[in-house]
Amino acid sequence: MGTWAVQDAKARFSELLDTCVAEGPQVVTKRGLEAAVLVPFGEWQRMQAAARPSLRQLLLSEAARFELQVPARGRAHRRKLEALD
């Protein structure tokens, strides 16, 4: 993974982009600290797909997805049936 100072990345963006596509992710630093990563689009798509859980994973997960409010039992009012004459 290559490292580029922000000044070099701005001045030579086309070269940065070509290097990213050919060699993989490139780190951009600002004042010596890692600030960003330029990633090829195909790799970005793979990362997005891996980060998104599948329907199967969602359905089988133990994490609560919402609060279900269930009314207490025995408090329902029922109509009395009238005797048939």
Image (cartoon, rainbow, N blue to C red):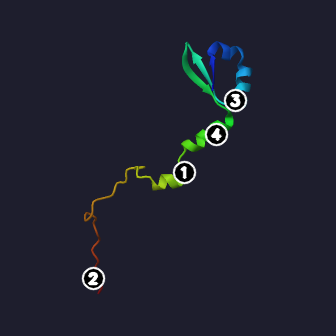
Assess whether mark 3 and mark 4 are in contact (beta carbons under 8 angstroms): no
* Residue at left offset 30%, top offset 84%: 84
Quarter of the image with the C terminus in it: bottom left
Mark 1, other Cα within 10 Å: few <14 / some 14–19 / many ≥20: few
From this view, report whether residue 66 is shown above or below residue 24: below
Q: Amino acid at mark 1?
A: Ser
Q: Amino acid at mark 4?
A: Gln
Q: Amino acid at mark 2?
A: Ala
Assess whether mark 2 and mark 4 are in contact (beta carbons under 8 angstroms): no
> Which of the two discs, 2 and 3, labels the residue nearer the N terminus?
3
Q: Could you tell me which secondary element the residue under label 3 belongs to?
A: helix
Mark 2, other Cα within 10 Å: few <14 / some 14–19 / many ≥20: few
The answer for how far apart the CA atoms under marks 4 and 3 are is 17 Å
Quarter of the image with the N terminus in it: top right
Out of 51 and 65, give the one closest to the viewer.
51
Q: Which residue is mark 3?
A: 23
Rendering coords of residue 52 (x, y %) = 55, 44
68 vs 6, left or right, is left
Disc marking residue 83: 2
Q: Which residue is mark 4?
A: 45
The answer for how far apart the CA atoms under marks 4 and 2 are is 69 Å
